[in-house]
Amino acid sequence: MHLAAAIAFIGFLIFLAHLFAGIFQRTRIPDVLWLLLIGILLGPVFHLLTPGQLGVVGPAFTTITLILILFESGLNLRFARLRTALPGTLALSICSFILVTLLVAGAAWLWTPLGAWGAVLLGLMLAGNSPTVVVPLTAGLGLESKTQDILFLESALGDVLSIVAALALMDFRSHGLSHWAVTGRNFLLGFGLALVLGALAAFFWSLALNRMRRMENAIFTTPAFVFILYGGSELLHLNGAMAALAFGIVLGNLDRQKPLLVSGVVPIVGLNETERIFFAEIIFLLKTFFFVYIGLSVEFTHPAWVAMGLVFSGVILLARIPAVRLTLARRLPAFDAEHAAAMIPKGLAAAVLASIMLQQHVHNAGLLQNVTYSVILFSIILTSILVFILSRAAARRGMGWLIGARAETKDELPISDDAGQ
């Protein structure tokens, strides 16, 4: 693509992203769906751009998007809300993870040449939801803060569980059962120490913020520090994503709940409104290009593999409905529970695992990667369609019946069913 045309297209895409966000608010057709379609048109359809042409920028860009979304979401998560959301998060995460893994593995074992081991591996790869999709969708749906917290934390935890479990299965196949104890210990240490490191880093950065604000053009120093924290954690073999999340949660709460031992003695500060708005704008831009990149990455060279992605997306929805019925249907308002059942999007964790399979020459790695990318595409499309359909009362009643939700009240309907009709 010619440089001038590329620059003009980037500007045009940003304008389109704001337009799509406005359409989402009016019609409940998610903006991510349009962005995905743009990526598909640019890549697989017209071959104007490919992920390979972006080199290492593409994978690095997706990781940066995940880091900043986790950080910014953590900033908005209050400790009181975290305590309220945690029981529902753990119940939904465990139940959904197990059901998705079992159903996808069973379907893959029956319908693909992956075999039992490859089928379970695919199930684990697709068991977690994507925070990069869940966060912007739930923010625009008018769900209660508790529901948003549960779905965000579930997606963040699911990504971690998916990566760890899939890598552990590969390790077990290579080295046997003895390595599982080592893998489990490394997971607990990497997860726990990352949370501690993120919390300590937040205290340090809150002390440094006032000095940083005296510098010229210093508003981007906080995201830069998050990148350093993530990279340092990964180099220490800790979970960088969890460190970024803990950093955001603690930094976002320090100015509201200062520890008694330092309150009034140590100048602890949090982020101001200008900085929060700035980070929200950055994430909006990153989200825009992230979904276009996902659309670029989908391959349609094997129609059968693409069809498998569509089938497995339906299987994941079939697993999601009983998971929400068992864990959330009576905890949340009907409107929220019904939309929680529609949240099945896959994203960065699944794509990263698919790339690892290819790099390590796992048996049938090409099939695993292509099916995974196809599931990422169709799961996001299916989620988008369900969100749009659930703006209708009849669709909500049907979903409510499936999940056993309690009856809706007028106070639980943020949008009139006649809006826009």
Image (cartoon, grey):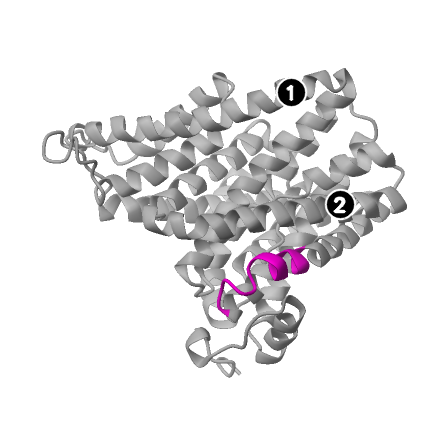
* Quarter residue 70 falls in: top left
Q: Is residue 24 magenta?
A: no
Residue occupied by mark 2: 102
Question: Does residue 415 appear in the picture of this structure?
Answer: yes
Residue type, numbered disc 2: Leu
Rendering coords of residue 387 (x, y %): 58, 65
SS label for mark 1: helix
Disc 2 secondary structure class: helix
Mark 2 or mark 1: name the one nearer the start of the chain: 2
Which quadrant would residue 183 be assigned to in this image? Answer: top right
Q: CA distance from mark 2 to mark 1?
A: 23 Å
Q: Residues within 10 Å of mark 2 (few under 14, many from 20)?
A: some
Q: Amino acid at mark 1?
A: Ala
Residue at 21% over, 42% down: 255
Whether residue 288 is visible to the viewer of this picture, yes or no, is: no
Q: Residue at x 74, y 20 (%)?
A: 177
Nearer to us of marks 2 and 1 is 1
Q: Residue at x 55, y 73 (%)?
A: 406
Residue 70 to residue 313: above or below: above
Judged left or right of residue 50, residue 114 is: right
Q: Quadrant of the N terminus?
A: top right
The residue under label 1 is 181
Spot occupied by residue 212 in the image (x, y as percentages of width and height): 20, 29
The boundaries of the magenta stretch are 320-333
